[in-house]
Image (cartoon, rainbow, N blue to C red):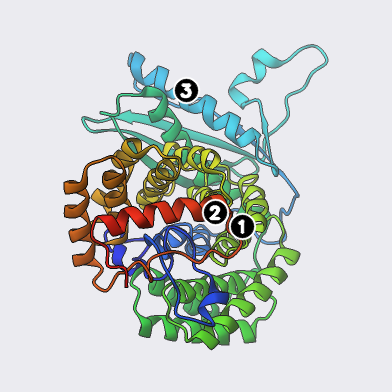
Amino acid sequence: MSTGEPGRAENSGAAGLAPPDAAVAAQTPPRRFFGLSGPAALAGAAGVVAIVGLAAAAPIVAPGLFRPATTTIAVMSIAVADGDGQAAAMARGVASQLTDGLAGINNIRVVTPPESHAAALTASARPVTADFTISSELEKSEQSWILRARLVRTADQEVRPIASIAVDIREPDPQLQQTRLAAGVGHALALRINALLHDRPATTSAGTQAAIEQATASITQTSRERFAVAQTMLEKALAAEPDNVDLAVALAGMQLRGIQMVWYSPQDAAAAEAGATASLDRALRAKPEYVPVLQTACRFQTAINQFAEALVTCARALKFDPWNGSVLYAMGLSQLNLGRFEDALATFQQAHRFDTPEVSRWTWLLGAGWANLMLGRFEDALPWLQRSIAITPASGRPYLLVSAAYQLSARPEEAKATMKKALELRPGSTAENTPPPFKNASPIFVNGIERILQANIAAGLPER
């Protein structure tokens, strides 16, 4: 499955809800369970995707002109149509949430917007001039709230669009509408500012651009052949520019994709894991606050079952982009594997509230369903899982979780019908090849998986 095509869930291949264990894969055919692999991790979340988004949003400040450790931002009042009280209330809530979220980011300082300076001045006080201001307007259509935001550089009034975010106006919870509008803009802005503070060289070679573009094409329209070509291009480009962090992260993301899709031989998978680990280590030393590096490392550590390390890296990434749903998803997976089911559920639910990037929506729905299932809340798990399947109906693995939820809820006929569907979509699935690798997993997690597996067997999953 590709990050840009959530319906292609079946391409998720190797990584189940639990990420693949490349070390085990290097020795034996990988055991997988309920597949939530590459897509979520690579959905917008993917290090490569993040890089491409940043590449499209080239640095706002000319190289060498402005490289501060932090930047100062003012959030202007959100413009709405005159006389629209509902829109005005919505705009105030969005602006408040956006301001609070930005104020919590390590490399951003939020100051009083210029429009409030007059009221804030005293005889001895002077306003702090922001490096940038965020201006935006909120519109209401029949179907959506639409928030358009842009970044304005104070020094020369250069304007750069940030995002255009639409939220279903039929959502009954106004607070959730506000949260998703603020998160959509905040996520895009956090990436933009982070890229600005890690300004790239003034020139990028044509080979580098081509390699990254080809890598992106491989992520969004994946095949084994495209993957091999893209990896070769990235390797050659990185050999020519060994200090290029963006290329290193793109290659690591590509190698992660290959591991998750089981596109490497066992020997090559081990080499790819080692190479990606080394590249990410170097990138983290070079740019320890760069979101694409942190995001890819977070996902990669989760995928190779380094769950404790992943929690630390994911938390660091969220300090610079608190709305990053891909990072939250990887964090939730690590918490699940460590037996911290309540924490995992809260993390997946937070990602669901933010809904960024939207293309990854099915992953945190699936994660929340899985966490409820591990907690023994079988009926609560079903709506989350069913909503996930509605987005990605092509994948058979989520049906295994649904079948287990039905079976454990004493609904055996529905469990059997769902298992039949799962086996149609995933022929050859058995009790031997569906469980995840248990390396570094908590015994509590292992016990929970065994309970789900027994429920699947009762619903018709072949034992071997």
Question: Is residue 213 shown left or right of residue 22?
Answer: left
Answer whether labels 2 and 1 touch (C-beta < 8 Å).
yes
Q: Which residue is mark 1?
A: 307
Residue with the mark numbered 3: 93
**Looking at the image, which is closer to me, 439 or 235?**
439
C-alpha separation, residue under disc 1 versus residue under disc 3 = 36 Å
**What's the amino acid at mark 2?**
Asn
Circle 2 residues within 10 Å: few <14, some 14–19, many ≥20: many
Q: Work out whether mark 3 precedes mark 2 in sequence or the reverse, and give the earlier one.
A: 3
Q: Mark 3 and mark 1 in contact (Cβ < 8 Å)?
A: no
Amino acid type for the residue under numbered disc 1: Phe
**Crowding at label 1, few (<14), some or many (≥20) Cα neighbours within 10 Å?**
many
Q: Quadrant of residue 438?
A: bottom right
- The residue that disc 2 covers is 337
Depth check, front residue: 430 or 284: 430
- Image location (x, y in percent) of residue 59: 59, 57
| Nearer to us: label 2 or label 1 | 2
Residue 107: x and y in percent read: 70, 44
Q: Is residue 150 above or below residue 15?
A: above
In the rendered structure, which amino acid carries the disc numbered 3? Gly
